[in-house]
Amino acid sequence: MSTEPALLADGAVSAQRPANLFAGLARDWGVVFGAVVILVMVAIGVGAPLLGTVDPSEINPTFRNRVPGTEQVIRRADGSTTTYRHWMGTDSLGRDVYSRVLYGARISLLVGATAAAISIAIGLVIGLIAGYVRWLDGVIMRFMDGLMAIPAILLALAVVSLFRAGILSVIIAIVIPAIPLVVRLVRAIVLSVREEPYVEAAIMTGTPTTLLLIRHVLPNTIAPLIVQGTFVCASAILLEAILSFLGVGIPPDTPTWGNIIAEGRGLFRVYPHNIFFPGVCLALTVLAVNMLGDGLRDRLDPKLAKRV
Amino acid sequence: MMNTPAPVLDVHGLTVRLPGGADRRHAVENISFAVAPGEIVCMVGESGSGKSVTAHAVMGLLPREVTASAGRILLDGEDLLKKSPAELRRLRGDRMAMIFQEPMTALNPVMRVGEQIAEVLAIHADLDEKARRARVLDIIAAVHLPEPKRLIDLYPHQLSGGQRQRIMIAAALVLDPDLLIADEPTTALDVTTQAQILRLIRELQLRRNTGVLFITHDFGVVAEIADRVVVMQEGRVVEEGAAAALLRDPRDDYTRMLIRAVPSLTPPAREPVSTAPVVLATKGMSKTFTVGGWFTGRHDVAAVKAVDLYVRRGETLGVVGESGSGKTTVARCIARLIAPSEGAILVEDADVAKLGTRALRPHRRRVQVVFQDPYRSLNPRRTVGESIVEGPVNFGTPRAAAFARARELMRLVGLAPEALGRFPHQFSGGQRQRICIARALAMQPEILIADEAVSALDVSVQAQVLELIDDVRRRFELAVLFITHDLRVAAQICHRIAVMHRGEVVEEGPTPQVFGAPAHPYTRALFDAAPGRNFAFGA
């Protein structure tokens, strides 16, 4: 029997090798911009104490509402003095806005990352079940549809009012409306992948369902989930700010970007700096996360990727 | 050739460069051929031979990165490679037209079919609304579609595949182009529909004296329709000549190999029908799908109706039929990828038709499937070794032992055992299908279901994979259920044939009997439609 050339030799044809998914990402300026901004924000959050900040909660009634760049001379007990420059001014309680914005980055990024991770973890499991267990599909998806019908803010308000206000209840409040998005995405992928012949071949070889899902179905969801994760993260950062702004989020003594903006709202016309700096940070972070997500999607989602 | 009139299409020394990083530098290299008026030139070759690139180069539809770097393409004496995009746009539709393989996607789904034909007229011809409508009705009648007046107001999804391809042909021919390029126009169609479309192209082309460049991989179609044949291999023309002569007496080795690989419609002499014990039998097996939902009316569609089949040890039963005949549903029921609605599936006298997931596990060992699409049958993220040992490991074989057996199986299917560590994308389609066979054999099954297992392969590779399936059948005394739409393939490999039509088995018997004296009218229609049936291929 004649054989195809290169059949027995080591030189099997290497046709259409799929390109490494992450190769070339560094050439996408949107991804680079997003990644750099996020890294800077993380560095700011982590390194806040080392970046010339003072206690962000320290109230100074004598030094309220100063414009950015004002210097304050601090007199110590032993008579020596130091000058401290309020780069972003002070708020209506005399707290240093610069320190508050830097410490606020911690909360925003923490909430964003945690909410994204938790909603993806929960959504992934529910989505796999909905996509694979036919009779549960209808029940789960109608429940998810119901969840999606409630505005996220309203849901978040309800959750926060049920529990004690704090970072945990804010995260829960953000995660719940994000779950249906992930579930729908995962379910759609599972529904298409389960029809693939290699999945059916795995069924024919007696692969148990759990293993089948983990080994053959799950890997297909990873790339889209990374992308979805960035978008959940961006909306989580925004939602946290909104909740804090509305005064139902993280207690006002903790510095978060939303809290700082809320605090500055009253005197916003006279002292716009109270809103300007946290606002810029918030916008920049959300923009960066979204741009990173867009770049990743172009790269990872074959349906939206530009054709060569 | 006789004293030829000036050709419609004259391709001279055409070279098309591929972008860097492709598997070869030129898609086609220095090819020359001509199409005379009223002549059908078939361009044949295996996948990757450059047929479609040639067609797209002529139409000026090459992707931006792929450029014709040398040569001339003369349409009625004008060089198309020197034309601007706007000039080409005027020529397309008017002087040259193209029909495509996939009639499902080549038509705009949100536009009535009449409008789609009228659009061609609106762009190229100066006609008023009324005259356009008359021309559209004319051409629809010319492609033998029923009730043109009603049909022009339908949307593509309301038509069958064959009807859609007729609409495509109507749109292509409505302006009487000098050149028609047909890129595998019948590949996606059933044989009976294919025969009608081929007849239609022949008829219209004769009446209008159109030159046709017909691209195909199917030598049956070539024998049916071609005046002249151009054989392509890896971007070069290896042989060209009048159809009858070339098919009977090919000169080039490659052409000879291709033609020799075309399975004959005459079944070879085989061992007499065996009396070995029956391994697999279905008794009155039916499958009904319920379509519709909560708000739309539900109705049942019977995909398979009371099918009785049996396969003996060491025997191949072919199930043939057109798309929608239920043959794949039969295979999926027997494999228990789906549950039949009624009836019994006896695997060595044990009924597996109604078993639940857990009770099915022992059954899984005994029945294995090789699927149609070699590119989707293997998990792209896992090495082929992992794919092959997955089954045995699931059933408790230690990994080392399973891998040892996998190495043996790789050798058996004609691949190097060292290749176990590679990923599927590193293999060709034929090699992947071999791997799928190895994966099936690793389970030591008694029944092997080949669901269109060679349909996606080039003819030369197809012959080798068929040989392999026959070889493992003999070696392991497998009962093989061979599902195919290709009568030639069925004739070569099957001991017995069951013909399915609309969910029912209309005829069943030993292959020579079914092929020699088909009893059922549908079977006869099917054989009549087989392209190139009256042609004895040389070589």
Image (spheres, coloured by chain):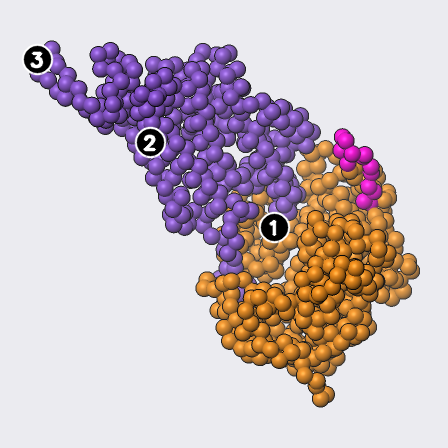
Chain colours: A purple, B orange
Sequence-first tag of 2 and 3: 2
Query: Against A265, is B502 above or below?
Result: below
Residue B164 is inside the magenta segment:
no
Q: Amino acid at mark 1?
A: Arg
- Nearest the viewer among A20 and B41 is B41
Which numbered marker is on residue A241?
none
Q: Which residues are magenta?
A: B292-304
Say which quadrant the N terminus of chain B sits in.
bottom right
Front-most of residues A13 and A118: A118
Most distant residue in the front direction: B128
In the orientation shown, which residue stands out farthest toward the bottom?
A: B3
The answer as to whether the residues below labels 2 and 3 share one chain is: yes
Q: Residues within 10 Å of mark 3 (few under 14, many from 20)?
A: few
Indicate the amino acid at tag 3: Gly
Q: Residue furthest left?
A: A79
* Residue that badge 2 annotates: A42
Q: What residue is shown with label 1?
A: B376
The mark closer to the camera, 3 or 1, is 3
Viewer-nearest of discs 2 and 3: 3
> In the image, residue A115 lies at what x, y percent?
46, 26
Residue for point 53% across, 46% down? A304
Residue A110: x percent and y percent?
A: 39, 26
Letter of the chain that mark 2 sits on in the rendering: A
Q: Secondary structure at mark 1?
A: loop
**Visible residue check, residue A256:** no
Residue named by callout 3: A79
Contact, CB < 8 Å: mark 3 with mark 1?
Answer: no
> Which residue is pictured at 48% across the width and 20% down the height?
A172
Q: Is residue B429 above or below residue A152?
A: below
Residue at horizontal 38 percent and vertical 26 percent from the top: A108
